[in-house]
Amino acid sequence: MNKAELIDKISKDVGITKLQANEALNSFTSAVVDALKQGDRVTLVGFGTFSVSERAERNGRNPREKTIIKIKARKVPKFKAGKEFSETIGSLT
């Protein structure tokens, strides 16, 4: 499912226009990104938690030249699925 398909689904499920669904989805994603930038976590009970994780500096390898390169430390977004979400997906098999 891509963004356009998600917007269409939200629009139909809630009974709003696609423009309103797009604005709601954009607002949600912006709110999550802003919270993570400030170092906060976003927890949606039953769905999961968005957070920021720090990766330490490490050595990598350039596969073309076979040389070792330094990969800088950085912050990366992380998502941990909630229990209900995990159980729902796990029961699909």
Image (tube, grey):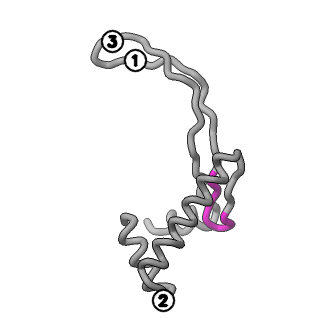
Which corner quadrant of the image does residue 67 belong to?
Answer: top left
Residue at point 61% right, 65% down?
Answer: 47
Taking the view exactly as shown, the residue that stands out farthest to the left is 64
Residue at point 49% right, 16% down?
Answer: 70
Please, what is the three-letter code of the amino acid marked with disc 1?
Answer: Arg
**Total numbered labels:** 3
Q: Say whether disc 1 or disc 2 marks the residue closer to the N-terminus.
A: 2
Task: Find numbered disc 1 in the image and state the secondary structure of the residue it sits on.
Answer: strand
Dot 3: within a 10 Å radius of its alpha carbon, few (fewer than 14), some, or many (20 or more) residues?
Answer: few
Task: Find numbered disc 2 in the image and state the secondary structure of the residue it sits on.
Answer: loop
Q: Which residues are magenta?
A: 44-50
Please, what is the three-letter code of the amino acid marked with disc 3?
Answer: Lys
Report whether 65 appears left or right of 58. left
Confirm whether the magenta stretch covers residue 35.
Answer: no
Task: Give the x, y percent position of residue 4.
Answer: 36, 69
User: Marks 2 and 3: which is nearer the front?
Assistant: 2
Confirm whether the magenta stretch covers residue 49.
Answer: yes
The quadrant of the rendering that contains the C terminus is bottom left
Report whether 15 appears left or right of 30. left
Dot 1: within a 10 Å radius of its alpha carbon, few (fewer than 14), some, or many (20 or more) residues?
Answer: few
Task: Give the x, y percent position of residue 89.
Answer: 50, 65
Question: Residue 15's mark?
Answer: 2
